[in-house]
Image: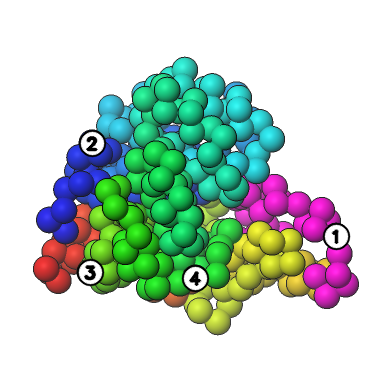
Amino acid sequence: MSNQKLNNLLGIQYPIIQGGMAGISESILVSAVSNAGGLGIIGSGFLPASWLEEEIKKTKNLTDKPFGVNLLMQNPGVADLVKVIIKYRVPVVFTGGGNPLPVFPYLQAAGVKIIPVVALARLAKKMEDNGADAVVVEGMESGGHIGEATTLTLIPQAKEVLKNIPLIAAGGIYDGKTAAAAFLLGADGVQLGTRFLASKECQVHENYKKAILEASDENITVVGRFTGHPVRVIENELSKKIKKLEEKNPFPEELRADKFAGSKANSGDINQTLLLCGLCAGGISEIKSCQEIIEEIIKETKSFF
């Protein structure tokens, strides 16, 4: 916890990053996390450049603290999103869901810090070799799109190969104990998605938040493995329907990735929406403000060091 490398890089008070959840992380949640001393991230997902532009403007009106944007590389309009990011001088970009190297030169030329999210130690090293400013290693415990390695194994293996840049850990981290474990294994910071999903400021429907509080490790499942882009969700009618479809050996296009990107997160019908959620939901029992979440994590983490 005494390592200030990530805080200094991003200009933040605490080494706590809010995951860039597509279609969920918008200006109200993002600004609340940044105002509480962490780093809020707008999740652009498959949304258009016009949406991102509006969210950046709103966020700038709600906070004077640093914040970032998460780019989903599968978005066919990613070039237009990059133009918006550069236009509004967003200080940092997180990338996921594909190869980010084609956008590196444009972001670097504009002075935007780049932090790719990866699921393998080898890719963490590749990102550093290509000039990334930091890297997030995300274990399969996380919600949404997942890899095959666990957070517990990823952190020390990635730390071993990285030479100079900060390492941020993600997947299964939701409180001071899990954050302390990540720091002990070598992380310079932590990224939380599901914990902030169950926050007062998150704009998803209250039924979604209630489903997170009621979820356990027994009813959080993975769908879409055959597409090559598996997604961790809370089991419901839609996830069961998708699993039935998977048994019929469909074409990957029949389960398009944009259907997984939180586009219906504000719907009250939680049975017909993919409820992206990490395995840590079983440890979350209360909706709290972002300020409370961050302060409790920092206080509890410090008690271990």
Q: Percent position (x, y) of residue 190? A: 32, 57
* Amino acid type assigned to the residue bearing label 4 in the image: Ala
Of 11 and 272, the residue lying toward us: 11
CA distance separating discs 1 and 4: 26 Å
As drawn, the label of residue 11 is 2
**Dominant SS in magenta:** loop
Can you say whether 74 is above or below 1 in the image? above
Q: Label 3 to label 2, Cα distance in Å? A: 23 Å
Q: Which numbered disc, 1 or 2, marks the residue that appears first in the sequence? A: 2
Q: Are marks 2 and 4 in contact (CB under 8 Å)?
A: no
| Residues shaded magenta | 246-275
Which badge, 3 or 1, comes first in the chain's sequence? 3
Disc 4 secondary structure class: loop
Image quarter of the C terminus: bottom left
Element marked by disc 2: loop
Q: Are marks 3 and 4 in contact (CB under 8 Å)?
A: no
**Residue matched to label 4:** 149
Amino acid type, residue under disc 3 in the picture: Leu
* Residue 129 location, quadrant: top left
Question: How many angstroms separate mark 3 from mark 1 (CA)?
Answer: 43 Å
Q: Earlier in the sequence, mark 3 or mark 4?
A: 4
